[in-house]
Image: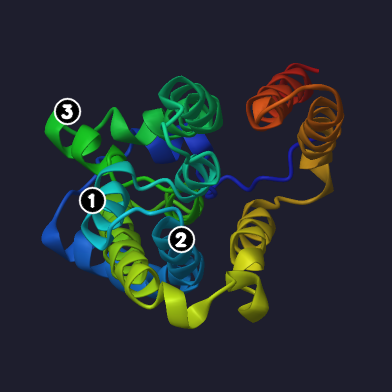
Amino acid sequence: MSTETSDSPTESERADRTMHFSMTGVREGFIECIPIALSVAGYGIAFGVLAAQAGVTVAEAAFMSATVLAGAAQLIAIELWAHPIPVGTIVATTFIVNLRYVLMGAALQPWFSRLSPLQSYGSVFFTADENWALTMGEFRSGSRRGAFLLGSGLAIWIFWISATVVGAVSGAAIGDPARYGLDFALTAVFIAIAVELWDGRSRLLPWVAAFGVAIGAASVLPGRWYILLGGLAGCFAEVVRVAA
């Protein structure tokens, strides 16, 4: 039996409400995301340090952060950086890692279908794992601030670029980022995201499925396929759970 009350809107009813896209929403999203953007800056510094050690200039590292805006993919690319640059390997690996954005974008579709193409696609460019999780919580709560993703993404974008520059400029002085725990920053942020997205025991099945498949795939497949396969397993398990 459903536990929802008659005055509690369902997810589809929330999605049907008119979305408002305004500078107020951008500003509020930006401010609310600053604490998370500060944590993102931690591994932004780590990326800048590693980029400098790989021979990438400060301008090149900053340009990569401004145009790619994908911490995991950028760190992987720098790990694979060599001379001559293995373009095919880097493109293939980062493509696999970033395929998760297809799933993330699909999750936002019910709300962003109420916005204009310019508003929705302009916001999606600034999507990162962290502000996507914040935005999902925002929209599922019934909020109609359609510019929240853009505002929160701008906060992460600015802090990410700034931290990249700091890391690249001071790379020699900082040395190994692991000495300061910066190598754990990415893991810590994703743990915080997982806590934010937890909806209780009723949603345990997709979590277990995603975790199990990701661990299994990581042990038998090369590269980063476990990220995509874990995400797909979680999606499939959720479909089965809802249909049951």
Residue on which the image places disc 3: 117
Residue on which the image places disc 1: 63
From the viewer's side, name the closer residue of 21 and 51.
Answer: 51
Residue 13 placement (x, y as % from top left): 44, 35
In this rendering, is residue 63 above or below 35? above
The quadrant of the rendering that contains the C terminus is top right
Residue 12 placement (x, y as % from top left): 47, 31
In this rendering, is residue 71 above or below 121? below
Residue on which the image places disc 2: 53
Amino acid found under the numbered disc labelled 3: Pro
Residue 148 placement (x, y as % from top left): 30, 55
Amino acid found under the numbered disc labelled 2: Gln
**Residue 74 tag number:** none
Residue that appears at 35% across and 36% down: 111
**Mark sitting earlier along the chain (1/2):** 2
* Tag 1 and tag 2, C-beta contact below 8 Å: no
Amino acid found under the numbered disc labelled 1: Phe
Q: CA distance from mark 2 to mark 3?
A: 40 Å
